């Protein structure tokens, strides 16, 4: 993701400060910031594999345990647009130190949690802390390395970011199976502490940030409104179905508050001189289409990210280690897709057909997942998961480059923040919607099966497994339809000029 304008490596006159590039130990600086950034990515993929174990530990259903993921993503969505001005007012180094320390503390508290409510609160703390670690790390690396080594710096950054989703599921499965799901959080404490020590020792702010700090304005009302709008939206999606949607008074009041907050946010941000989110960017069609595509892609991707380990462990009865090995190929597929996009962008100026093909591949693999049965062999699981990663992995860098590439350079930071906020919101919404659909579908299939057949205690358990299988199949099928419908929208993106590098969105 592009950094906020406050992260730019230039002084007020636009010139790069030589002293910023003459720091010693540039590789130690890189290691310091990468350690924290990779930790946040690893945490997401590790936790997904442990969800079924956490579900049993807290004795809750799928709709409740999904909040372990949803709460984190929602907190990240709220914090992303704020990260720029916080870095200006506080300084990058101090902000990164506080973020890492807070992430470590929240991780320890997650491991100590004794109820689903406690771990949701602590995951929100993790999200608030982790939101800025990626853009801050990227900005600090660009500041530390000389201009002629920026490609090397971002390649190093990209390798670290791509390794996390490949290693994460397998590592999480091994930790869960060998120790406990709680150690998936405890492991962050020593690693995060080392990152904090290294940041304190090796990372320093450039002088020009002090000048920017003095002139910074804070959009306090915008912060309150965006927090209220996103939080209430997520609460209704996550818990509304459990209480009968609009039959519950609290749902009606919360929806009303969400609508009022959203309308207030739009009116305020369009008139405030230094808005926390620049909604005028939605007036650019290619940007609006790109945000829509990646928000819905994030919805589909995180639906599958959540359902795969739950399905493998709860329906096919894999252990955490086996489930981690089974879902790891998705991360490998994403890495291969990113590398392939980089090569294809050097040959073809119009990458929009690749986006459409990516959606088609993802749709077909989601459909194949909807055909899984109680007797599905491991080989029939691995290939769709791998190809799903290939398909959806090819979409992100191209859409990001085509959408954000149309924005003026001075607004890139705001565009990137808004982009990331919407994608994370789509992911959080996708998880909430998927779990609601899954729970409702399970109840329907279970009622149909159990009322149509005689049952002994053992036979009833078998039929309940069948009901869960059919429910997962339904949600996978809906995901496939969504991805299929997104394909033609790729051509509403504005075609990039022949000299545009569509790999710019690759992190």
Image (cartoon, helix red, strand yellow):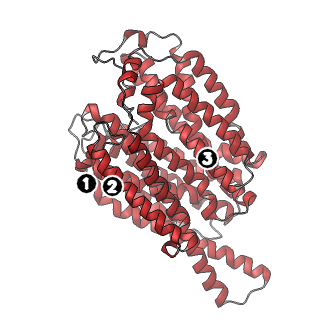
The image shows residue 226 at horizontal and vertical percentages of 42, 48
The image shows residue 471 at horizontal and vertical percentages of 57, 72
- Mark nearest the camera among 3 and 2 is 3
Left/right of residue 321 with respect to residue 90 in the rendered view:
right
- Residue name at image x 28 percent, y 35 percent: 411
User: Viewer-proximal residue, 342 or 480?
Assistant: 480
* Badge 3 element: helix
Q: Which residue is mark 2?
A: 356
User: Viewer-proximal residue, 72 or 141?
Assistant: 72
Furthest toward the left, the residue is 497
- Residue name at image x 57 percent, y 23 percent: 32
Mark 3 vs mark 2, CA separation in Å:
35 Å
Q: Which residue is mark 3?
A: 123
177 is higher (above) or lower (below) than 380: above
For marks 1 and 2 on the same chain, the one whose residue lies earlier in the sequence: 2
- Mark nearest the camera among 1 and 2 is 1
* Badge 2 element: helix
Residue 371 visible in rendering = no
């Amino acid at each position: 993701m592009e950094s906020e304008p406050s992260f730019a490596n230039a002084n007020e006159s636009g010139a790069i400060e030589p002293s910023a590039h003459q720091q010693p130990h540039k590789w130690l600086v890189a290691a310091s910031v990468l350690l924290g950034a990779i930790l946040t990515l690893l945490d997401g993929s590790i936790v997904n594999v442990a969800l079924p174990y956490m579900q049993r530990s807290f004795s809750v259903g799928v709709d409740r345990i999904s909040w372990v993921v949803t709460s984190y993503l929602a907190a990240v969505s709220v914090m992303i647009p704020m990260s720029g001005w916080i870095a200006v007012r506080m300084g990058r180094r101090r902000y990164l130190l506080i973020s890492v320390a807070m992430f470590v503390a929240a991780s320890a508290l997650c491991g100590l949690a004794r109820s689903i409510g406690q771990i949701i609160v602590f995951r929100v703390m993790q999200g608030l802390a982790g939101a800025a670690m990626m853009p801050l790390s990227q900005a600090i690396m660009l500041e530390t390395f000389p201009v002629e080594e920026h490609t090397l710096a971002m390649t190093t950054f990209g390798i670290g970011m791509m390794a996390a989703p490949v290693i994460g599921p397998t590592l999480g499965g091994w930790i869960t199976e060998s120790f406990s799901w709680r150690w998936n959080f405890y492991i962050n404490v020593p690693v995060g502490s080392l990152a904090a020590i290294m940041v304190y020792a090796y990372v320093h702010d450039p002088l020009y940030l002090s000048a920017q700090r003095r002139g910074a304005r804070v959009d306090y009302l915008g912060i309150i409104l965006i927090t209220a709008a996103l939080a209430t939206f997520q609460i209704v999606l996550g818990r509304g179905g459990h209480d009968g949607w609009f039959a519950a008074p609290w749902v009606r009041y919360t929806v009303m508050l969400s609508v009022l907050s959203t309308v207030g946010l739009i009116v305020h941000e369009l008139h405030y001189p230094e808005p926390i989110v620049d909604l005028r960017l939605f007036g650019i069609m290619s940007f609006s289409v790109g945000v829509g595509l990646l928000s819905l892609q994030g919805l589909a991707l995180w639906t599958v990210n959540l359902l795969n380990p739950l399905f493998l462990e709860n329906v096919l009865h894999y252990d955490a280690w086996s489930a981690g090995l089974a879902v790891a190929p998705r991360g490998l597929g994403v890495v291969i897709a990113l590398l392939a996009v980089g090569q294809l962008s050097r040959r073809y100026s119009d990458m929009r057909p690749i986006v459409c093909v990516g959606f088609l591949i993802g749709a077909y693999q989601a459909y194949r997942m909807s055909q899984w049965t109680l007797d599905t062999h491991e080989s029939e699981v691995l290939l769709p998961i791998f190809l799903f990663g290939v398909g959806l992995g090819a979409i992100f860098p191209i859409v990001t480059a085509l959408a954000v590439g149309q924005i003026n350079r001075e607004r890139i930071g705001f565009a990137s923040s808004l982009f990331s906020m919407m994608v994370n919101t789509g992911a959080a919404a996708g998880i909430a919607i998927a779990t609601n659909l899954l729970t409702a579908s399970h109840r329907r299939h279970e009622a149909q099966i159990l009322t149509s057949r005689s049952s002994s205690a053992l036979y009833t358990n078998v039929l309940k497994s069948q009901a869960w299988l059919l429910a997962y199949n339904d949600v996978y099928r809906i995901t496939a339809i969504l991805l299929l419908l997104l394909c033609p929208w790729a051509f509403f993106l504005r075609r990039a000029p022949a000299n545009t590098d569509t790999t710019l969105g690759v992190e």
